[in-house]
Amino acid sequence: MYNEKQMSIDQVSGVEVTQLTDYKGHSHHLYFTNPGWYDEGKRLLFASDRNNRSNLFGLDIASGDIEQITDLDEHKRSFLPVCVNPLRPEAYYRDGETFYAIDLHTHISREIFHIGKDWNLHMSNCGADGKHVYISIFHDPEQLIPRFGAAASARVWESHPLSKIIEISCEGGEVRLVHEEKRWLGHVNTSPTRPDLISFCYEGPWNKVGHRIWIMNLLNGKIHPVRPVSGEEVVGHEYWYADGERLGYHGRTAPGRACMFGHIRYDNSEKTDTAFPAGGETGHIFSFDETLIVGDGDGVIKCWKKEGDSYSSPRILCTHNSGMRIQKTHPHPRISPDGKYLIFTSDRSGYGNIYMVPLVEFYNLPEFKKS
């Protein structure tokens, strides 16, 4: 059992920031599309490199107590694609060639799918009814991603790898191939309210992939692009709103143009693209709806608030100062299920650690000024 909780006051916003981990090894929360809370939001699942091994840990939000969940014996693995079942105390992770379910209370794991050594796991996500977990995998016999990380992205995209989206039963382990293409697919995301809907994307350079965001109806297997792009438009970092009907994203209408936030219903209705005042980079963004959006651009956690038909200038919730050199130390801000605080990761101390900051009154925060 660990407890590394410590408080500080952000020097820019004056907001109290709670550091939840403090270890000479990287710790990080799950990818920003994958909520890591469990036990009715009282605990947070995260990954940490401790004692020369990478494992999953559970953090008690109130006390700061940390317990080890997995007991794996090597360090070359990624837990960014891990997901938590919304209705049962389980999480899902890859170890070696195998995909496992683990009970978050008993810490007992069971194999539910054999991925194989030549397949790279891109993302996993659990359906809204808790019955199935969905994974996106792509054929990677040269192990480009494990060997080179993000630097291999262009090579993977150019190779048009065979990609698959697979549905795995959380109860019995039954497996169903729901989609495959000779194209790099990734970021399979499940609607938080509709077990019949998932989104996925064509991964690769945003300006080259064409229509990035796609929706699949799991009942009939049909797919269609969402928020089709034209000309020089780029959109991405898509995620589901809490209503499970709409997706949020950000992008630009052309290179050098001002950024915009957008949201759209899964059937391509209610498209809303909103330009906002210049204010640096958005970074990864997240929100429950269109009213308040958070992002991690320019070394700070920013907030934007919807004001009429536009957005406010960004305000600074706190600094993060992450070097963002590797994916697991990107801040990837994520708002808590109760909407009272957010978590982010930063390596500003030299190692990735997890931080928590309350979502205080927006207009009490200082405005971000691009230098």
Image (cartoon, helix red, strand yellow):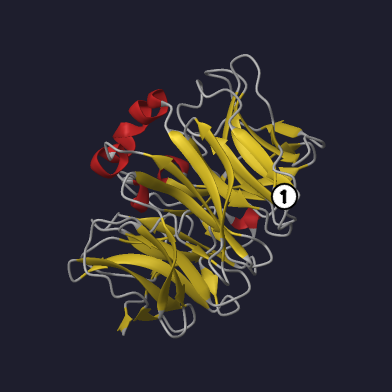
| Relative height, residue 354 to residue 239 (above, below) | below
Is residue 147 toward the left or the right of residue 285 in the image?
A: left
**Count of marks overlaid on the render:** 1
Q: Nearer the viewer, residue 114 or 94?
A: 114
| Residue 139 rendering spot, x and y as whole percentages | 39, 39
Q: Residue furthest left?
A: 52
- Quadrant (top left/top right/bottom left/bottom right) for the C terminus: top left
Any part of residue 232 in sight = yes
| Residue 318 rendering spot, x and y as whole percentages | 46, 55
The residue identified by callout 1 is 291
Q: Residue at x 42, y 32 (%)?
A: 161
- Quadrant (top left/top right/bottom left/bottom right) for the N terminus: bottom left
Q: Residue at x 69, y 43 (%)?
A: 221
Q: Nearer the viewer, residue 251 or 193?
A: 193
Q: How many residues crowd around disc 1 within 10 Å: few (fewer than 14), some, or many (20 or more)?
A: few
| Relative height, residue 72 to residue 213 (above, below) | below
Is residue 343 toward the left or the right of residue 148 in the image?
A: right
Any part of residue 16 in sight = no
Q: Residue at x 43, y 27 (%)?
A: 160
| Residue 106 rendering spot, x and y as whole percentages | 43, 85
Tell me which amino acid carries mark 1.
Thr
Label 1 SS? loop
| Relative height, residue 132 to residue 239 (above, below) | below
Q: Residue at x 62, y 21 (%)?
A: 253
Q: Quadrant of residue 306?
A: top right
| Residue 292 rendering spot, x and y as whole percentages | 67, 51
